[in-house]
Image (cartoon, rainbow, N blue to C red):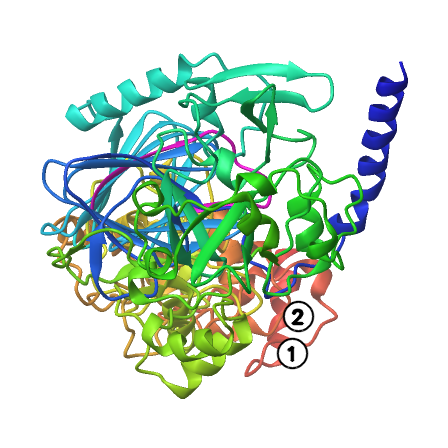
Amino acid sequence: MNRLLLAAALSAMVLAAQPQFQGQAQDPDDPPSRVARLNWLSGDVAFQPATLDSWTNASINYPLTTGDHIFVNPGGRAEMHVDGSAIRLNSNTNFGFVNLDDSIVQISLNEGSIDIRLRQLDQNDTWEVDTPNGAITLQRAGDYRIDADGNGNFTVVTVRNGQAEMYDDGSSLLITSHRTVVFREENGPQIGPERGRDDFDGFVLARNSAEDALPRRDYVPDTMIGGEDLYAYGRWDSDPEYGSIWYPPVDVGWTPYSTGRWAFVEPWGWTWVDDAPWGFAPFHYGRWVTIRGRWVWIPGVRTYRPVYAPALVAFIGGGGFGISVGWFPLGPREPWIPAWGASRRYVNRVNVMHVTNINVVNVNVTNINYVNRDRAVAVSRGDFTGARPVRQSAIQMSSAQIRGAQVLGTAPQVVPARNSVAIGSQRSAPPVPQRMVVARTPPPPPTVNFQARQQILSQNNGIPLRRGQVEQLRAQQPAAVVNQAPVRPIGSMRQAQRPQVQQQPQVQQQPQVQQQPQPGREANPGLGNRGQNQPGPPANSQAPINRIPDRMNSRPGNPVQQQQQQQQQQQQPVQESQPQRFPRQQNIPQQPQPAPPIQARPLPQTPQPAPQQQPAPPQPRQRPEIQQPPPQQQAPPPQMRQRQEQPQPAPQQQPAAPAPRVQPQPQPQAERPAPRQAAPAQQAPAREARPAPRGRPAESQDKKDDEKK
């Protein structure tokens, strides 16, 4: 009973302390709380770290972050996870992370095929895939396949289930479940039903089925990266003191952080990369302890979102330890304090699942009674910085050496080398084309390479560079950035187009004419001539993209539909319509004369000049119908009368005789044509006191009235 009361009190203390860091703003020097884990490889897969221009062979369990690239060669495949969501890469795929932090997963797909199984999408989370033909945002949890062709310059988006939206320079297209859309730069989007499955889809289905078959329980949160493997390996149990515990599938004598290697991954620094297929979550989350002589892993309180850590160990060294580097796993309730001086918010978040008193920023690491200190592992500095496997290079240490070593904290005070970043075998660069991709979200600044960072790393004794130091290096050494595929934001082109659009003389009246959609017509002008004579949004508009779900032909921002409207409306009389915005129109006629084109369609007294670049054959057949006789000017349909009352040039081709009757008040007899010089006879008797029309004597008008009586 006392133990249960104590556990309840500790839980209440943790819950009460949570608002202390949830409401605080994130410090710019704090690293992201999540990464991508490369968890499965097959065949030849190459890897380029963010800070290097060279390529290595990819390694499982390597944490991927902003700027990292993966190239899957022919015959190979790869899989990675982010927050429980799976990203699978097919052969001949050039993949990269444009940005990966707490609020966005921004992917670059230069060529190849990927499949994304998005398990959940938080309110403030963004998933975006940037391709050479446009940017795709995933708007719901679901299954998505995206193909980017390296030669044909097209992108195919297939939504198995979920909802996505494709953005290009001025328009967007919503893609719903069971739809496939092909985007070509020269022909425009082509939408159709979900395409059939191929060999890559069969591979994805097999991987999904294997995940779904796991006996998942609520031992770890779904957002704990690598947590799904702990249901396939090892064994779960419950302990009265620690709660849920996990037994790893290891041999007797095994020690945590002993079957892998060390890598230098910025912005975290020294990072553990384990060799085991389950070796990610237990080494970047949770704590280790021995129970009855066996190692068990403690995931911690499940209430909070897990925060990634590079390695939850304490390093030892100092006098008497020689040139070796040693470490041991942190135990229950032992805090992990980053060596780079992280904010209080970050330290609290990364420790809250395991430390009751989360205000641990000013903890003196030398005063902690570490429970796992006697289980330390050590290697030489050369093996440590060279990323050599620990199992093959471990140094046997006596208990006296371990007890006499100094606790250094969470950083070993070792300066990294180039091999510390590229831990795989060096290889030649794959044939990666440097094709520009289109991004809806602006990308972060380019990454500064490792060679430019190395001097500051030496001065910092191996502590990772902070944001201000990186920005200073980028400004001082512009050439010291990693050469990667260029990324062009969509918004920059749209902003440059707006001033050109608003200078068109007929922009304000043109939308009133070109508004009646004619879905029965066919046209496919494509997406060519981008930015040419395109009316933009109003000046106070936030974005020229319009969203209308599911129907491509009804989207105002669709360039194919806009050109259809232009061709159709010049062939048919204009019906009453309301003004609209058209983010993209390709062929707006340039009017050389101020003659109003609005009158030329419903009431065409004068022929309309032939529109430029309108080769549609139906136009010659329609124009004779539009050219009606001039007398119809006197009796327009009711819906056209409203248009005539709008400000426009003076009426043309009016009969000469009725001209004197413009000054008197309008009369009903104006609806029927009057004979020559007979208009005065139509004057109503009630108006006999009014002055006579100009040029006629008053007596003649009185005489006419008497005769009528």
| Pointer 2 residue | 702
Q: Relative to the observer, which residue lies in front, 212 or 378?
A: 378
Q: Is residue 350 visible?
A: yes
* Secondary structure beneath label 1: helix
User: Residue 602's x, y, as percent?
Assistant: 36, 55
User: Residue 250's x, y, as percent?
Assistant: 41, 23
* Residue 118: in magenta span: yes
Above or below, 305 relative to 268:
above
**Quarter of the image that includes the N terminus:** top right
Which stretch appears magenta? 112-127
Above or below, 202 relative to 29:
above
Q: Relative to the observer, which residue lies in front, 67 or 609?
A: 67
Q: Are marks 2 and 1 in contact (CB under 8 Å)?
A: yes
**Residue at 47% across / 23% down in the picture?**
248
Q: Relative to the observer, which residue lies in front, 128 or 674?
A: 128
| Location of residue 438 by image quarter | bottom left
User: Residue 60's x, y, as percent?
Assistant: 31, 39
* Residue 544: in magenta span: no
| Pointer 1 residue | 698
- In the displayed structure image, the side of residue 24 where residue 116 appears, left or right: left
User: Residue 339's x, y, as percent?
Assistant: 59, 62
Q: Residue furthest bottom?
A: 476
**Residue at 29% across / 61% down in the picture?**
419
Above or below, 340 relative to 206:
below
Residue type at mark 2 is: Asp
Q: Relative to the observer, which residue lies in front, 530 or 533?
A: 530
- In the displayed structure image, the side of residue 192 where residue 67 appears, left or right: right
| Location of residue 496 by image quarter | bottom left
Q: Is residue 169 visible?
A: no
**Quarter of the image that includes the C terminus:** bottom right
* Secondary structure beneath label 2: helix
Label annotation for residue 507: none
